[in-house]
Image (cartoon, helix red, strand yellow):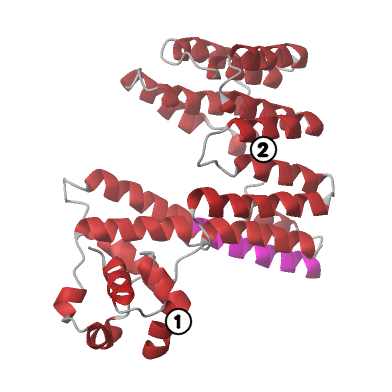
């Protein structure tokens, strides 16, 4: 049992609230909540106090298996916006120490990549804010604009930088090694379409059809034609998709995304709502976020805030998530709009 869960069990057994335990330890109740949700663990200096409060030995209180460690890291990545340097370093060193553990190696590698991605995104957010402030003082600085673009994954028109030939080559090899894995084709199609390599995309799509007979075939036919400038044909295929797969909420969600990229926002909102209504619980927040983004673009800020709040409520009702980065992200979106 992880120490956070053990603390929760012992606390409830004694009828102590998080606030009361926090008061005894002279820390915040939020810290207790993070322990019990396996986002962090108590500082070692608090273990003697905890053992006294609960009437157990430190050994009984603190026992963390490799599985517990990996779960804790995964929870922190999912629920924290950015880790402190000390926490990041401790997780990094632990994962490095487990790279030769054959039983957990695949998961350790995945978590290592996720850990660095999360930290990189956090630093990009900090970089973005500095770039905004720098542009207030020096609005004609090309360097500042370039830094803002890098921090926000902005559009780059220079083909030498923007093309994806390295990843395209990787996924061509990947699908030859894993021909029955449908998502490998999807990653490759996304890259080919982004680079305008529509002829190759059509060929790959026909190969994908043999292993994926879902709505995705018509969805990607539509995306390829849209990229090729055949908008009427693209719309024909996207309508055919929802006609052929009317009971698949993802077909309606894909249609909403399609219309959003054409700036046909009313059509997009209509399909986002339909997709969300059809989706079984627990529902994802993507449809509400898409609608909020559209209303923000249209400067209908009250409506945007409404749908960001609906996303927060959905996290609470369907996922029992009331704190952490999933909620904080939408709160930051609301704060950004309110500060306009």
Which quadrant, please, contains the N terminus? bottom left
Residue 77, visible in the rendered structure: yes
Residue 195, visible in the rendered structure: no
Which residue is found at the position 54% from the left and 28% from the top?
191
Mark closer to the chain start, 2 or 1: 1
The percent coordinates of residue 174 (x first, y second) are 37, 25
Which residue is found at the position 51% from the left and 14% from the top?
205
User: To which residue does mark 2 refer?
Assistant: 158
Residue at disc 2, secondary structure: loop
- Residue 161, compared with residue 39, is above or below; it is above
Which residue is found at the position 41% from the left and 61% from the top?
76
Which quadrant, please, contains the C terminus? bottom right
Question: Image check: 326 left or right of 179?
Answer: right
The foreground one among 232 and 149 is 232
- Residue 296, compared with residue 147, is above or below; it is above
Please provide the residue range marked out in magenta.
120-136
Neighbour tally class for label 2: few under 14, some 14-19, many 20 plus, Cα within 10 Å: few
Estimate the spatial distance between the alpha carbons at disc 2 and disc 1, rounded to whole Å: 55 Å
Question: Image check: 279 left or right of 66?
Answer: right
30 is within the stretch colored magenta: no
The percent coordinates of residue 338 (x first, y second) are 78, 63
Residue at disc 1, secondary structure: helix
The percent coordinates of residue 29 (x first, y second) are 46, 79
| Displayed quadrant of residue 228 | top right
Please tell me whether mark 2 or mark 1 is closer to you in this view.
1
Furthest residue toward right: 299
């Amino acid at each position: 049992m992880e120490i956070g869960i053990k603390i929760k069990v012992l606390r409830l057994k004694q009828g102590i609230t998080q606030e009361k335990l926090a008061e005894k330890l002279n820390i915040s109740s939020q810290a207790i909540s993070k322990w019990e949700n396996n986002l962090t663990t108590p500082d070692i200096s608090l273990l003697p106090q905890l053992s006294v409060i609960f009437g157990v030995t430190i050994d009984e209180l603190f026992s963390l298996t490799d599985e517990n460690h990996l779960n804790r890291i995964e929870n922190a990545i999912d629920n924290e916006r950015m880790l402190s340097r000390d926490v990041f370093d401790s997780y990094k060193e632990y994962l490095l120490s487990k790279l030769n553990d054959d039983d957990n190696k695949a998961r350790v590698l995945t978590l290592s990549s996720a850990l660095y991605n999360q930290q990189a995104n956090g630093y990009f957010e900090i970089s973005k804010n500095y770039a905004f402030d720098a542009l207030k003082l020096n609005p004609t600085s090309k360097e500042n604009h370039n830094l803002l673009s890098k921090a926000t994954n902005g559009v780059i028109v220079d083909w030498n930088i923007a093309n994806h030939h390295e990843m395209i080559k990787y996924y061509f090899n990947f699908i030859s090694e894993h021909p029955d894995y449908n998502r490998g084709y999807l990653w490759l199609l996304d890259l080919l379409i982004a680079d305008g390599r529509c002829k190759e995309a059509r060929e790959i799509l026909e190969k994908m059809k043999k292993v994926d007979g879902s709505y995705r075939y018509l969805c990607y036919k539509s995306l390829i034609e849209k990229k090729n400038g055949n908008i009427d044909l693209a719309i024909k295929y996207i309508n055919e998709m929802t006609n052929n797969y009317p009971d698949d909420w993802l077909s309606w969600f894909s249609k909403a995304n399609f219309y959003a990229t054409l700036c046909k926002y009313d059509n997009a909102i209509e399909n986002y709502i339909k997709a969300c209504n059809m989706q079984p619980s627990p529902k994802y927040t993507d449809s509400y976020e898409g609608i909020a983004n559209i209303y923000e673009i249209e400067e209908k800020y009250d409506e945007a805030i409404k749908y960001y709040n609906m996303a927060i409520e959905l996290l609470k009702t369907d996922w029992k998530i009331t704190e952490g980065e999933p909620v904080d992200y939408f709160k930051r979106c609301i704060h950004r709009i309110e500060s306009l």
